[in-house]
Amino acid sequence: MPAVLTVDPRSGVPIYLQIIEQIKRSIALGVLQVGEQLPTVKQLAIDLTVNPNTVGRAYRELEREQVIETAPGRGSFVRANGATELPRVAAEIGRDALDVALREAKSVNLGREEVRELFETALTRWFPSFEK
Amino acid sequence: MSTITISNLRKIYAGVPAVDGFSLEIPGGSVFGILGPNGAGKTTTFKCMLGLARADSGEVLYDGKALVPQMFEQIAYVPERSVLYEWMTVDEHVEMTRRAFSRFDAARAAELLAQFNIDKRKRARALSKGMRTAVMVALAFSRNAEILVLDEPTGGLDPVNQRHVLSLMINEAAKGNSVVFSSHQIGQVERAAEHIAVMDRGRLILQGLVDDLKADRKIVEGIFPDVNFTLDGIANDSRVARADRTERIVRLLVTAGADEIAARLSGAGAVGVRVLDLNLEDIFLYAVSPATATTDVVAKENSL
């Protein structure tokens, strides 16, 4: 398990959501590989100094979303249904980030066309045309 | 995994109710944090739970049963104030606790005291406030108790040892034991507690899962182009707990449905509508001090 998993308890974002987001990100980046074993709920709770039930809640949600699977007595694993998981998780992270950006843009009264222009500019900056 | 049920607890000291009709269910196998300003009734509640104070009315039940002396073995308590005997050494306290509690693990106590850098040959009177707390914590966590009641278990400790106490609490919960604790340091409660209850003037004013409170409670903020705006009854929505209006800015504390209320605020003509997250400190301050949590926060019936 990546040592990069950290939580910020003082954030307004629930801790279990922070854990979910970071595990998804680790999968999308290949830090956690398909089929790889996750730490036990107890171990991760101790590592992060957060309540075991909070970690358990994150794991249950990840199971429900079919990101991980738990084999009784063996532990939790990144779901082993091939490479299809990776783009899906990555797409979810991208979609959530765009949602946040668009909500901000809307809150300061930018119009659809203005947002489109800004988006095109940003797109060119981050993904120059010679890149895929 | 005992569930602790506190029902209508009342305790009056010199005519003043320290605990005033307090009810709470503390589920087994979790870390439960009790928050509240000084004098909120946290310590009195703990004393009534442990049989150290006699309630004037109401009761505390463990899995439906009243506390009996046979259960003392299962419950460990760290009081807010030192109960160490000034003339006794740390080692003698370990020995005394070993004699009193059959499940006490003296090797574990020695290990914990070493982790807290406590010299066991010292007499209690030579210990600082933080060292006294550490000794009481070490003794309590060596009892193999199923329920730990900790009143300010990090008082006087440095940040490293504070974190160590939190880790010990998490360990107990991972073993299925219950931890109930109070702390003035909201950051600790936020990190370690699954559930919280906020007490104020002897009463329960807020409780829930920390993560759910954060997910549900938000500030919805909007700016109106003109000072003469109306909120179309949004402030009367039962999910709006508080409304703060200054000039053209309106700030609503909502207990659920933030996105929907934000949409209604936009519909009423507000621009720059934002939904802001609250951390536990914000949630706590809004709960206990409606008039001072932010500037100009007023009860909604008075303002809008």
Image (cartoon, coloured by chain):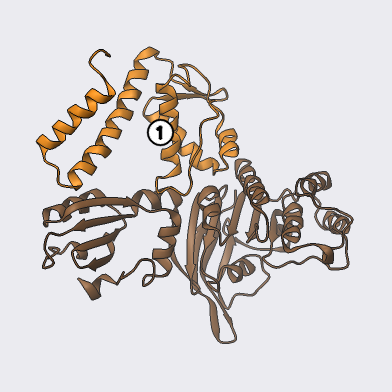
Chain colours: A orange, B brown
Please say whether residue B238 is visible from this viewpoint. Answer: no
Number of marks in picture = 1
Compared with A102, A70 (above or below) is above
Chain under callout 1: A
Q: Quadrant of residue A93?
A: top left
Compared with B290, B117 (above or below) is above
In this image, B107 relative to A53: left or right? right
Residue at image position (53%, 80%) is B17
Q: Residue B210, position in %: x, y?
A: 45, 51
Q: Disc 1 marks which amino acid?
A: Glu
Q: Nearer the viewer, residue B258 or A96?
A: A96
In this image, B276 relative to B155: left or right? left
Residue at image position (21%, 54%) is B261
Quadrant in which the C terminus of chain B is drawn: bottom left
Please say whether residue B199 is visible from this viewpoint. Answer: yes
Residue at image position (20%, 65%) is B236
Local SS, label 1: helix
Compared with B26, A130 (above or below) is above
In this image, A56 relative to B151: left or right? left
Compared with B133, A3 (above or below) is above
Q: Quadrant of residue B10?
A: bottom right
Q: Residue A45, position in %: x, y?
A: 56, 38
Q: Residue A120, position in %: x, y?
A: 18, 27
Residue at image position (11%, 53%) is B267
Residue annotated with mark 1: A21
Instruction: Residue at the far bottom: name it.
Output: B15
Q: Residues within 10 Å of mark 1 (few under 14, many from 20)?
A: some
